[in-house]
Amino acid sequence: MAAKWIETLVGSLDQKKQYKRHMARIEALPEPYRSAAKALQRYFMYHGGILDGDTLITMLGDFVDLWERAVADGTPVRAIVGDDPVEFAETFVQAYSGKQWIDKERERLRKAIDAAAGDNGEEKGG
């Protein structure tokens, strides 16, 4: 019972364990892959704003798989991220369609404007 309450408050404990395993896999990458992967992962957390834990875990697992394959194949970092790492990171995050924090704010904004404008769309006040 306590575990369900904790999961409701802080999220899935299984997802936290998976996240830690993925992060350990990133730490195990040799240089320069580890540094590149860590920098991108940090950017994902700031830019992506993914709200759905399942989507985040899936994305991070796929991300680590990408880097592990690059290590195994000897693919250079630039061959993976290209000339613009920001574009790479943002394109990578866009491939995961989970709910994002901004979705919540967009809906909040819509509701606030709807309430301010009234049910019929006319401005309140005068």
Image (cartoon, helix red, strand yellow):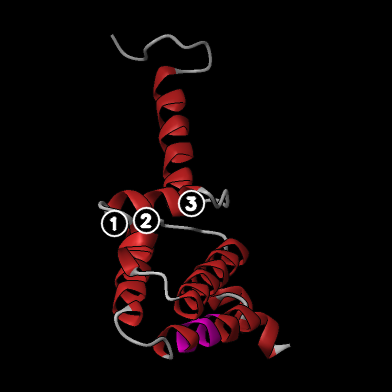
Amino acid residing under circle 3:
Gln
Foreground: disc 3 or disc 1? 1
What's the CA distance linking mark 1 and mark 2?
6 Å
Q: CA distance from mark 2 to mark 3?
A: 15 Å
Q: Is residue 98 left or right of residue 24?
A: right
The residue tagged 2 is 89
Assess whether mark 2 and mark 1 are in contact (beta carbons under 8 angstroms).
yes
Task: Write the residue at 51% across / 86% down.
Answer: 20
Looking at the picture, how far across and down is residue 30, in whole percent? Answer: 37, 88
The residue at which mark 3 appears reads as: 100
Can you tell which mark lies on residue 118?
Answer: none
Q: Which residues are magenta?
A: 19-24
Instruction: State which quadrant residue 71 falls in.
Output: bottom left
Image coordinates for residue 95, horizontal then vertical, percent: 53, 49
Residue 26 percent coordinates (x, y): 43, 83
SS of the residue under disc 3: loop
